[in-house]
Image (cartoon, rainbow, N blue to C red):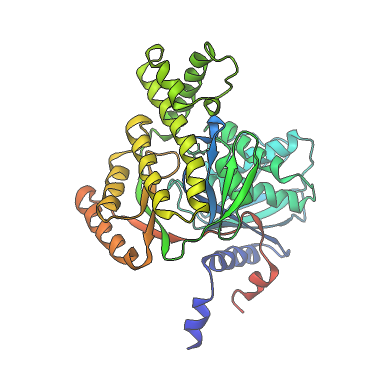
């Protein structure tokens, strides 16, 4: 009856918005702006962004919602629904803090705004979401881009979108300590309904490509683990790539980054490189080529060829780039055994999710058998999500907001 119909038509984001708005209303009298910032998937192109290469991310229906309004006095406050915790930022001196950790993502954004000459009016903000933290779905990028967008709206700053993307990345580099590429912040900000983004991370030129999945679904398998090496190993990989570039520059002075290098060039100078540096460079240069070929597969509606490339990417990430882990390798193995079209680890690595392209009629059986096998092998509960490709960061429409709970 009515109840069923009602719930069937409400999206997760409506429930999150409802929670965020109720909390805001319980705390404050002002009418807030409501902003949605999504997490992202990446179909292919891993660890290529900081090498000036290509990536193929998309924003998804897992998101953070912010409610924000001017403060009636001089104090500013931010409330995190997930942590049930307040933070009171100093808008003139948004220095990093030791606790709570989540505040640093936001403080980094405020610091960028201040350093770019903007004056922020005191505000009150409540936020919450359903992007599982540490799962490689870029909850951190969503927090940064969403907050940049929110403060830009609230203060009517008219900051160009690309500038906000860079401010968000700056926050991650300097207030969180991960020297990330541009992919996550770009995808969270620029995503579009049912479209993947083909992004050139050198020029930031991009194009949207329709994702025609027809009889397939995107299934994420969350390992539920986040090995502690993530951040330090990430920065190490960056340094190893730079080391490779420096060696290649002796022969090819025009080379600026691995984007300018082919796998053949890497092979030719193998003997001059430390073993690990060779492996890293060979993987990255191969992956950059692979993304370009995968873009053709997508336009040719050749999902099978696309899926095979996902497996190749995983193989490279696992054996050459060495950012996978037993849990991720196991889950990709499960997908391979079930003859799933494509599967690979996604994001930075050392835990988080695999991304799988699964025929619709196989989704249920794949999830249940992978869950059982994962439990048996690691005694861990696998959490699987079927995700949909959605638009990027923006104001939630009034209609969506007032539809909630009415
Ligand atoms: C993380 C980073 F934040 C991205 O910039 C990207 O390098 C990715 O790892 C690996 O492709 O998500």
Q: Seen from this angle, which residue lies furthest front?
A: 300
Query: Looking at the image, which residue is at 66% across and 38% down?
Result: 166
Vertical side of 192 occupied by 292: above or below: above
Image position of 180 (left or right of 362)? right
Query: Looking at the image, which residue is at 62% across and 79% down?
Result: 406
Give the tally of numbered discs.
0
Q: Seen from this angle, which residue lies furthest left?
A: 376
**Residue 133 in picture, x, y percent from top left:** 46, 49
**Residue 136 in picture, x, y percent from top left:** 45, 46
Q: Nearer the viewer, residue 186 or 35?
A: 186
Q: Nearer the viewer, residue 138 or 84?
A: 138
Query: Looking at the image, which residue is at 19% across and 53% down?
Result: 376
Res 233 seen here: yes
Vertical side of 182 occupied by 41: above or below: below
**Residue 183 in picture, x, y percent from top left:** 56, 41
Q: Nearer the viewer, residue 332 or 75?
A: 332
* Residue 233 position by quadrant: top left
**Residue 138 in picture, x, y percent from top left:** 51, 46
Vertical side of 255 occupied by 329: above or below: below
Q: Nearer the viewer, residue 285 or 227?
A: 285
Res 100 seen here: no
* Residue 186 position by quadrant: top right
């Amino acid at each position: 009856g009515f109840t069923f119909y009602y719930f069937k038509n409400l999206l997760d984001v409506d429930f999150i918005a409802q929670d965020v708005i109720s909390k805001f209303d319980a705390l404050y009298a002002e009418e807030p702006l409501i902003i949605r910032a999504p997490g992202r998937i990446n179909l292919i192109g891993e660890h290529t962004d900081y090498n000036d290469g290509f990536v193929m991310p998309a924003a998804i229906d897992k998101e953070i919602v912010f409610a924000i309004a001017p403060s009636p006095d001089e104090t500013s406050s931010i409330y995190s629904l997930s942590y049930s915790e307040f933070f009171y930022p100093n808008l003139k001196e948004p220095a990093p803090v030791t606790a709570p950790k989540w505040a640093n993502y936001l403080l980094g954004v405020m610091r960028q705004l201040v350093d770019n000459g903007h004056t922020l009016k005191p505000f009150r903000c409540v936020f919450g979401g359903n992007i599982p933290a540490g799962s490689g779905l870029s909850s951190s990028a969503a927090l940064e881009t969403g907050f940049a967008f929110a403060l830009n709206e609230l203060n009517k700053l008219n900051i160009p979108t690309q500038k906000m993307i860079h401010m968000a990345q700056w926050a991650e580099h300097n207030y969180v300590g991960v020297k990330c590429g541009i992919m996550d912040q770009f995808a969270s900000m620029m995503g579009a309904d049912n479209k993947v983004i083909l992004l050139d991370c050198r020029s930031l030129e991009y194009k949207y490509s329709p994702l025609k999945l027809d009889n397939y679904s995107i299934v994420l398998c969350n390992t539920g683990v986040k090995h502690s090496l993530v951040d330090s190993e990430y920065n190490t990989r960056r340094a190893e790539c730079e080391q490779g570039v420096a060696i290649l520059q002796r022969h090819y002075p025009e080379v600026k980054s691995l984007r300018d290098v082919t796998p053949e060039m890497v092979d030719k100078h193998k003997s001059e490189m430390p073993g690990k540096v060779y492996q890293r460079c060979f993987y990255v240069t191969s992956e950059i080529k692979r993304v370009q070929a995968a873009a053709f597969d997508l336009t040719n509606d050749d999902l099978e060829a696309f899926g095979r490339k996902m497996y190749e990417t995983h193989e490279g990430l696992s054996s050459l780039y060495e950012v996978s882990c037993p849990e991720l390798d196991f889950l990709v193995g499960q997908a391979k055994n079930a003859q799933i079209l494509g599967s690979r680890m996604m994001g930075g690595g050392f835990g988080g999710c695999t991304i799988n392209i699964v025929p619709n009629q196989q989704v249920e059986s794949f999830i249940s058998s992978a869950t059982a096998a994962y439990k048996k092998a690691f005694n861990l509960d696998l959490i699987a999500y079927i995700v949909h490709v959605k638009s990027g960061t923006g104001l939630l429409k009034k209609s969506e907001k007032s539809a909630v709970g009415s």
